[in-house]
Structure formats: structure tokens, C-alpha cells
Amino acid sequence: MKFFVDTAEVDQIAELNDLGMVDGVTTNPSLIMKSGRDIIEVTKEIAEMVDGPVSAEVVALEADAMIEEGRKLAKIADNIAVKVPLTWAGLKACNVLSNEGNMVNVTLCFSANQALLAAKAGATFISPFIGRLDDINLDGMELISDIRQIYDNYGYDTQILAASIRSVNHAYQAAMIGSDVMTAPPAVIKKMAEHPLTDAGLDAFMKDWAKTGQKIV
């Protein structure tokens, strides 16, 4: 499974990228606001840093305006994926932008029917929001599983990009189901390395090592 980092904080992306943990980056208007940076400037910096897709989201609500914004964002770098919402206008924009050779990430997906429409419209990525479904007592992982089955049934090339991941369990479950990509905050990705038995084992090793009085260097 590919790891995308869900942030516009350049320093956090750089840390994970240096470890080979970054296959791409996703941003949205809220993340751009938190960064305090100009959208064009920070997106360009991120796109130069990572080799994989960098999602940059349109903010228009009408199809023609989305297309205009998408074309401008796509010019930032060759690895830009234009992010559009899963509305009828967004599907129209997706179809035009993808037919022009752009990567398109269709976001805010909350149903399998929506995901099917996005694939038909030529989406490169579909972003089902796991955490937000969990918030209203629905099973976000069930949606990932349904989309996986539908896409496999018909051979759609659209990649499932599990989004709104809030825990290491979300990451694990999405991988088990067969999500092509997950996008998560840096803190969640780093937390995947943690386990209490690892900590306990390391503590025991260090105590025993101290008793030997030895040094390696």
C-alpha cells in the first residue's frame, strides 16, 4: 500500500520523505490554512520535494470554474493531482481534466455509488473518508471493502485512496482490505512503529546490557 502524507507542513513531509515513507502528499483548503502559506507557493515546494502525486484542491463550486482552477493547479508541477469534490459539478470537472491528461483525485466520497461514478468519470484516485463515517456511527471500512469489490468486478483503474485516517487501526484495516493508498497525518504514520511489547523488550535489553559493562563504540 502506498503512503500519502496528509499535510501541508513541509518540515513534516521532509522528515518522512527522507525515510522513504512518502509515496505522495494530499492537501486541502483546511491544511493550507493551517500551514499559513500561499497555496501555489507551498504546493510547488512540496511537489519539488516528493516524486509521487501531490493533491491540490480546487475551491470553486461550479464545473467550469473548477476546471479553470484545476488547470492552473496542474501547471504547478508534473506530479500534481487536481483534487475535486464528489459533486455532479466535480464529476464534470474530473472528466474534462482527466481527458486532458491530468491526474484527478475525487474527494469527499461517502458511498460506493459515488465511487462508481468517479471511476466512470476517469478519476485517478477516489478518496473515501473513513473517520468521518465512523463519526456518525457508520463503518468506514465497509465502504472501502465495497469500493474494492466494485472496482475489481469491472477492472476500473481508479485507485482507492483511504482518507480521513485517524488511527493505526484504520491504517491496518485499510491495508488488509486492499486499499491502494492511504493518506494520513504524519503523527499517525509515525505511531504505526509503536508497540508496548517492543518498548518492554527494548527496556529489558538495555538493563541487561548495562550489567555487562560493555560498549560497542
Image (cartoon, helix red, strand yellow):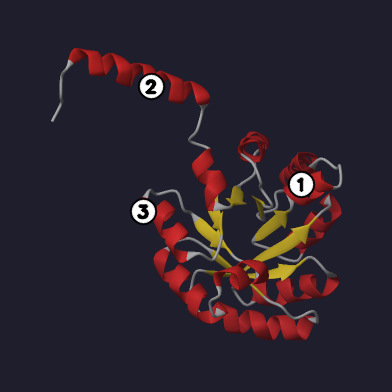
Residue drawn at (46%, 69%) of the image: 47
Which amino acid type is shown beneath numbered disc 3? Asp
Q: Secondary structure at mark 2?
A: helix
**On the rendered image, what quadrant is the N terminus found in?**
top right
Which mark sits nearer the N-terminus, 1 or 2? 1
Q: Are marks 1 and 3 in contact (CB under 8 Å)?
A: no
Residue named by callout 1:
147
Q: Is residue 85 left or right of 72 when viewed as pictured?
A: right
Residue found at the far left of this picture: 217
Q: CA distance from mark 1 to mark 3?
A: 32 Å
| Foreground label between 3 and 2 | 2
Residue drawn at (82%, 50%) of the image: 112
Q: Are marks 3 and 2 in contact (CB under 8 Å)?
A: no
Q: Secondary structure at mark 1?
A: helix
Q: Secondary structure at mark 3?
A: helix
Residue named by callout 2:
203
Q: Are marks 1 and 2 in contact (CB under 8 Å)?
A: no
Q: How many marks?
A: 3
Q: Is residue 17 left or right of 43 when viewed as pictured?
A: left
**Residue 1, visible in the rendered structure:** no
Which amino acid type is shown beneath numbered disc 1? Ile
Alpha-carbon neighbours of circle 3 within 10 Å: few (<14), some, or many (≥20)? few
Residue drawn at (17%, 17%) of the image: 213
Residue named by callout 3:
18
**Where in the figure is residue 110, as x and y percent of width and height?**
81, 54
Q: CA distance from mark 1 to mark 2?
A: 43 Å
**Where in the figure is residue 186, as x and y percent of width and height?**
52, 51
